[in-house]
Image (cartoon, grey):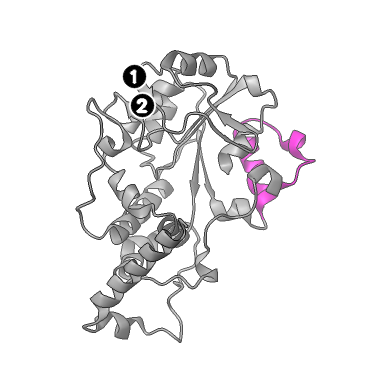
Amino acid sequence: MLEKLVYSMVADPSNKFCVFEACHHGDRARFTSCLEEMEAIMACDFEKVEHLFWWGYAEEGMQCGSGSYSPPSAAAQCQRAELRVFKTIHMHHLSLEALPLVSSVQGLKVINLVRDPRDVFMSAIGMGMVTPAVKSLTAEHDGLGLLAPGWGFYSGGDPGPIYITYMCEMLLGHARSESPDILQLRYEDLTGNESRAAVRRVYDFLGNPLDHADGLEVGELLGGNASGPVSSQTSFTWTCEEMAAFESPPCAEALTVWGYRALHPWEGASFDKAAVCSGKLAPWRDIAIKMGRLFTRFGALF
């Protein structure tokens, strides 16, 4: 969504270049970290990038790489573009990944988009992304390193609480990371009543006035309304461990820091969490919820 907004700043298709979701599972890049890969491709150096899973991604006016991928072709397309957009899907540790990049890559501007972590989690559950997201915390899963990654089964603990804790810790880290070259936006501000103001912030940050977009609807620029479920408008069923993770001090602090409501969607007169999650049947309830999600995902395939 946000990358489409930035991509709209330059009208000439031949004068812009984008890489969609670099450091993604399915890539092959001979680096030890995402930071190393991003620093190289932002300098149009694709020599060590053997494969980009999302090369050629196209949607609503965006074209992220044309033709078959090869390092020389990617480098040539990148070098001739005035505007270069690099969109990633990870929740990055800004102080360890983004801040070093803005110090080393001339002219780089970073836009960090955050969202209510409860909505992120529900969307990730619906798309089957929670376990892959936890696995992606290792460089090997994202196609980095000298050896080809394997498709090994996940064998760690419950990925849901792990993912929730990681999100909240990252959100706290984002709030503490400041740089004139990093703009932090809430997803809700881009899709809510203040979307025009949020769009103006993006254009001002990138040094491009909003004048050329005044004739466009913000919804058209952003590609539609909010995607995925919203926690206050859903019948999503939470496991006891997921609720406990969101009620933890780090998550409570993260919600406060980013201005999200403290009241959780399961906190209501009709649901007694203490009674539900303290009984002997609580583990079986969580298993039933997870099995129901699997059946829902399986049914969506047909």
Say which amino acid is labelled 2: Glu
Residue at the (44%, 41%) spot, across then down: 178
Q: Position of residue 36 (x, y in %)?
A: 33, 26
Residue 211 visible in the snapshot: yes
| Residue at numbered disc 2 | 37
Q: Secondary structure at mark 2?
A: helix
Q: Position of residue 202 (x, y in %)?
A: 61, 39
- Using the image as rendered, state which of residue 251 and residue 123 is in the foreground: 123
Say which amino acid is labelled 1: Lys
The answer to whether mark 2 and mark 1 are in CB contact below 8 A is yes
| Residue at numbered disc 1 | 48
Between label 2 and label 1, give the one nearer the viewer.
1
Q: Estimate how packed mark 1 is, as few (under 14), some (14 to 19) or many (20 or more) residues with alpha carbons within 10 Å.
A: some
Q: Position of residue 44 (x, y in %)?
A: 46, 18
- Using the image as rendered, state which of residue 95 and residue 124 is in the foreground: 124
Return the disc, 2 or 1, that comes first in the chain's sequence. Answer: 2
Residue at the (28%, 71%) spot, across then down: 287
Q: Secondary structure at mark 1?
A: loop
Q: Position of residue 95 (x, y in %)?
A: 36, 38
Q: Which residues are magenta?
A: 194-218
Residue at the (42%, 64%) spot, across then down: 296
Tell me if residue 216 is in the magenta stretch. yes
The answer for how far apart the CA atoms under marks 2 and 1 are is 8 Å
Q: Horizontally, is 252 left or right of 278 in the view?
A: right
Q: Horizontally, is 124 left or right of 196 in the view?
A: left
Q: Can you tell which quarter of the image residue 144 is in?
A: top left
Position of 116 relative to 21 (above/below): below
Tell me if residue 17 is in the magenta stretch. no
Position of 183 relative to 286 (above/below): above
